[in-house]
């Protein structure tokens, strides 16, 4: 078996490399954004034949760092796509944002299985991705803990028609229980203190706004071919139940486990087999109790914005994702406040008309226009 890892310097990517080493699976290619120091370390550790960094300057630095090796170093978007195009048994795509879409498409043409952690590929181009899967007869296995849970539960049912509703769990992030007034004064440091998971800054902020759950709702629609109304977001603070499925007979089946991404990553790689992991075992007596509550749409409007986009479909999801990526970037750069994130997303969503079924080229056009509109709105808003 041979693997490739895209987004290898992030939290999912690093966990993936640990899993591949645990399974004794060699790595053919690695790709990431701009961290040349970490990529040098990973290249020497994993010994792939090809590595790529999206940032050209970082790639140039990496070539110098790896000059004493036979590892091929590529740069730019085309370099990342080439790393995704290496023929492997499994390609794990953990690139953050719509930047992962083209690599996903390249991997679908060249790998037998895609273990997908880049939710934006499905959010922005769900129909196109599904057509690629059918055309190239590739397996697409979700890596997100929630979607892995749903996937595993549905594997236990022989009939898709038996599904009534997906119960998509959310930790609630660091601001659970706070109202809009309290959220107006939270800081970046506050937003990055996720109670249960260790993740990169972008997805951690998305978890704090509940936009991550909105994007996951859209992802679940694409993966499991259900409508938005068939998915219910449930706040579950303990992050033990990773998601549930309700069937037509009233039965609800859940997948439980510790909050450790190595478990769903490994299952996506070894499916349909299960192998021992290094993850801690769940002790229900230690947990004691599990809690569930509805999300607060007033305090966390990003979730409602995502649900609206999910119901509108197509270009609305692309527009939502682009505006969110920009707004989160501005918040991380300390140029806007936390509660401005939703305001800027709403503005772009209400003022940019988009097609219902965009082509691939139209997807990138919508993305670019929505980004420009959100940046401009933020500047005019004088929230910098």
Image (tube, helix red, strand yellow):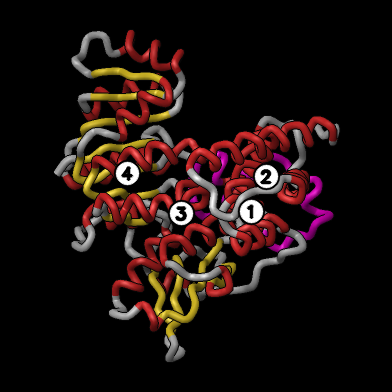
Which quadrant is the C terminus positioned in?
Answer: top right
In-image side of 93 versus 340 (left or right): left
Please, which residue is most extreme toward the bottom here? 249
> Residue visible at 65% across and 48% down?
354
> Residue visible at 82% across and 34% down?
383
Which residue has dot 4 on it? Answer: 92
User: Marks 2 and 1: CB-CB under 8 Å?
Assistant: yes
In-image side of 228 versus 251 (left or right): right
Label 4 vs 2, first from the N-terminus: 4
Cα distance between the residues tagged 1 and 3: 30 Å
- Numbered circle sitting on residue 174: 1
Which residue has dot 2 on it? Answer: 190
User: Marks 2 and 3: CB-CB under 8 Å?
Assistant: no
Q: Nearer the viewer, mark 4 or mark 1?
A: 4
Q: Which stretch did the figure color magenta?
A: 176-203
Which residue has dot 3 on it? Answer: 126
| Camera-side residue of 233 and 344 | 344
Q: Nearer the viewer, mark 2 or mark 3?
A: 3
Q: Nearer the viewer, mark 4 or mark 2?
A: 4
| Image position, residue 45 (x, y; %) | 24, 27
Cα distance between the residues tagged 4 and 1: 28 Å
> Residue visible at 46% across and 13% down?
57
CA neighbours of label 2 inside 10 A, class few (<14), some (14 to 19), many (20+): few
Q: Main secondary structure of the magenta part?
A: loop
CA neighbours of label 3 inside 10 A, class few (<14), some (14 to 19), many (20+): many
* SS for dot 2: helix
> Does 56 appear above or below 256?
above
- Numbered circle sitting on residue 354: none
* SS for dot 1: loop
| Camera-side residue of 277 and 314 | 314
């Amino acid at each position: 078996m041979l693997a490739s890892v895209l987004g290898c310097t992030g939290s999912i990517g690093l966990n993936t490399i640990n899993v591949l080493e645990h399974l004794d699976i060699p790595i053919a290619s690695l790709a990431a954004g701009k961290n040349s120091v970490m990529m040098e370390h990973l290249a020497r550790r994993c010994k792939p034949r090809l590595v790529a960094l999206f940032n050209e300057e970082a790639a140039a630095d990496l070539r110098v760092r790896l000059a004493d090796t036979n590892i091929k170093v590529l740069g730019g978007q085309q370099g990342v796509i080439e790393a995704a195009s290496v023929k492997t048994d499994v390609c794990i795509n953990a690139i953050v944002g719509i930047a992962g879409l083209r690599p996903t498409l390249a991997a679908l043409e060249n790998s037998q299985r895609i273990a997908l952690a880049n939710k934006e590929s499905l959010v922005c181009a769900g129909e196109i991705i599904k057509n690629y899967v059918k055309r190239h007869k590739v397996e697409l296995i979700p890596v997100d803990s929630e979607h892995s849970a749903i996937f595993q539960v549905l594997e236990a049912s022989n009939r898709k028609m038996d599904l009534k509703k997906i119960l998509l769990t959310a930790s609630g992030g660091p601001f659970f229980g706070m109202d809009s007034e309290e959220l107006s004064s939270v800081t970046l440091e506050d937003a990055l203190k996720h109670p249960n998971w260790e993740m990169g800054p972008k997805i951690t902020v998305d978890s704090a706004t509940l936009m991550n759950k909105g994007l996951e709702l859209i992802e679940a629609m694409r993966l499991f071919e259900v409508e938005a109304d068939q998915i219910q977001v449930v706040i579950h603070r303990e992050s033990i139940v990773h998601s549930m499925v309700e069937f037509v007979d009233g039965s609800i089946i859940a997948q439980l486990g510790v909050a450790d991404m190595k478990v769903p990553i490994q299952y996506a790689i070894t499916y349909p087999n299960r192998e021992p992991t290094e993850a801690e075992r769940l002790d229900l007596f230690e947990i004691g109790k599990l809690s569930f509550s509805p999300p607060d749409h007033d305090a966390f409007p990003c979730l409602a914005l995502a649900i609206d986009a999910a119901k509108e479909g197509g270009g609305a999801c692309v527009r939502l994702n682009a505006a969110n990526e920009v707004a989160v970037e501005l918040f991380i750069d300390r140029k806007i406040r936390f509660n401005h994130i939703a305001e800027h997303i709403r503005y772009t969503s209400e003022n940019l008309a988009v097609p219902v079924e965009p082509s691939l080229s139209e997807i990138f056009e919508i993305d670019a226009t929505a980004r420009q509109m959100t940046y401009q709105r933020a500047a005019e808003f004088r929230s910098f």
